[in-house]
Amino acid sequence: MRRAQSLEQVASGLDGWLADLALVDGVLVPNGRTEVLPMPTIVLSGNPHDGRRLAERFAKGRGWLRKDATAVEIRAAIDRALTPGARRRSTAIVLALLVLAVIVIAIAWYLLRLRV
């Protein structure tokens, strides 16, 4: 974990180091522009309205957390932010298996029907 003084410092990479995730204090987010950080970003905010609004300003915004979030909430948010692709893949795999099962059942039904 490293601490950056500004969003520009994070975007440029600290000493050649690129973070896996950025936790950004909402007061650092300037008005009226979309921030392009190269990593998923979670905004820390005092309330849900501001948190959602500020998180939408990041190209890779992954939501928001209360500034007084517990360690469990922070960990859960980080886990969600870092694994969205895995969830989408697992959902696609389950869907593909269901479609395959329907096809196999349809073929088996058709073949059994030919026997009778």
Image (cartoon, helix red, strand yellow):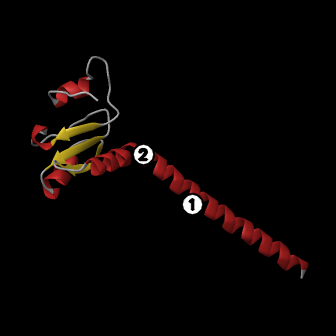
Judged left or right of residue 58, residue 76 is right
Of labels 1 and 2, earlier in sequence is 2
Q: Residue at x 12, y 52 (%)?
A: 46
Count residues near mark 2 (Cα–Cα under 10 Å), then give few for <14, some for 14-19, many for 20+.
Answer: few
**Residue position for label 2:** 83
**Can you give x and y, in whole percent of width and height, for residue 70 in the image?**
24, 50
Q: Residue at x 67, y 61 (%)?
A: 100
Please identify the quarter of the rendering in which residue 14 is found: top left
The single residue placed furthest to the front in the displayed view is: 71
Q: Which kind of residue does numbered mark 2 sit on?
A: Thr
What quarter of the picture does the C terminus occupy? bottom right
Judged left or right of residue 86, residue 36 is left
**Residue position for label 1:** 95
- Secondary element under disc 2, as helix, strand or loop, is loop
The single residue placed furthest to the right in the displayed view is: 115
Counting labels gives 2
Count residues near mark 1 (Cα–Cα under 10 Å), then give few for <14, some for 14-19, many for 20+.
Answer: few
- Secondary element under disc 1, as helix, strand or loop, is helix
What quarter of the picture does the N terminus occupy? top left
Q: Which kind of residue does numbered mark 1 sit on?
A: Leu
**Can you give x and y, in whole percent of width and height, for residue 84 in the image?**
41, 48
Residues at discs 1 and 2 in contact (Cβ within 8 Å): no
Residue 3 higher or lower than 64, as above or below: above
What is the C-alpha distance between the residues marked 1 and 2?
A: 19 Å
**Can you give x and y, in whole percent of width and height, for residue 5 in the image?**
14, 27
Q: Residue at x 13, y 39 (%)?
A: 29
